[in-house]
Image (cartoon, rainbow, N blue to C red):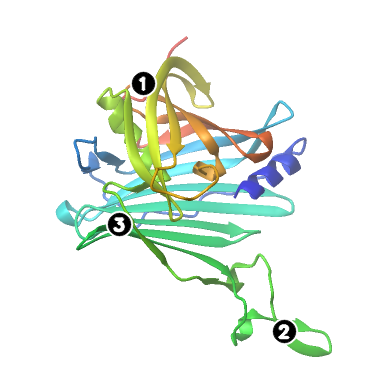
Amino acid sequence: MIRALCFLALFIAGSPPQDPGTADWVPVSATPADGELSIERTNGSPPLVIPRGEELSYLVEIDIFGKGVDVGTATFKSWVEGADAASVGHLEVAFKASAPTYTLDHQLHSQHPLSGDIKLQYSDTQRGSENRRREIRVERGEEGLTSAYRSDGHCKGCEDKAHFRKRVLRKPKHCKGCDGGEHRVWREFRERTVPEDTLDFLSSIYLIRSQIRCELERIATPVLEKDKLWDLSLVRGEAKVIEVPKGKYACRKIIIDAKKPASESHEGEFSGLFGMEGSMNFWVHESTGVMVQIVGKLPFGLRVKIRLKEAKGAPEGLITKKG
């Protein structure tokens, strides 16, 4: 994803924007009722709030030589399936972009059952010119919570004829490496224990809704990035009016930072939404907590900005500021 964003920004800069197309996803059996699904958390932490039937669209820009380059659209959706104890909350973000020689369809999807042993199911799927899949499952067992992570990779050798390439005047040969999704196979799961309330990053940013409503200066949560555990903090900052394509909004800055727990041995920086590294600044509406603008950094010194341009099913309190 990081390489894709950088490539698209450099390619699109100075060129007419390409139409990334419309999202082809439709929530199946989405619950039309008003209200929200609240996933309770331990130790007095605020709940994870999942809106029903909300769709927020954002313009994604990357700064190239001081110029903001439009590289695509990110759409955040949330819905609830089932009812009562059988309810399952869904959070999804899809990023679509295209250039004459490159297409990208990147989707993150989190599922939160209200009851049962499975506490979280998360998928990260990239399709288009490059393809890959990742999955995380967090489940309660006799000794606490365990996560299982797996990813796919190019098949290293098999008898499946679909993985063979035809050659002129020679026998077909098994492909050694390509970007096609049809040649990728799942690797084995990697399991580990995780703390209570462990989330994926997409889910963690929806904690901001509760943080704003409860007027909390700081909240924290354990977060999984693949099978790496991080301590994520969300700290409330300054107030400011932010102008985005949707209009002007009175916002509050939420600074999101990740630290490696003392128990972990992994190296490198935390990679957040769409490959953002290090601290990220989320500007959210002052009363509803809806994300208005996200600012972060990518490798190679690039900066990315995600700006609200359309809102459907959003809280009634999401009102633009006059003047």
Determine crowd level at label 3: few under 14, some 14-19, many 20+ residues with C-alpha closer than 10 A: few
Q: Which sits earlier in the primary sequence, circle 1 or circle 2?
A: 2
Structural crowding at the residue carrying mark 1, measured as other residues with C-alpha within 10 Å and reported as few (<14), some (14–19) or many (≥20) = many
Q: How many marks?
A: 3
Percent from the top left, x then y, of residue 172?
Answer: 73, 86
Q: Which mark is residue 140?
A: none
Q: In the rendering, at what x and y percent does residue 274 appear?
A: 54, 44
Pointer 3 residue: 29
Q: Are marks 1 and 2 in contact (CB under 8 Å)?
A: no
Residue at the top extreme, as displayed: 323
Badge 2 crowding class, 10 Å Cα cut-off, few under 14, some 14 to 19, many 20 or more, is few
* Residue 77 percent across, percent down from the top left: 40, 45
Spatial CA span between label 1 and label 3: 32 Å
SS for dot 2? strand
Q: How far is mark 3 from mark 2, CA to CA?
A: 44 Å
* Label located before the other in sequence (3 or 2): 3
Classify residue 270 as left or right of residue 70.
left
Disc 2 marks a residue whose amino acid type is Lys
Residue 286, numbered label: 1
Q: Is residue 105 left or right of residue 193?
A: right
Name the residue beneath numbered marker 2. Answer: 173
| Location of residue 70 (image quadrant) | top right
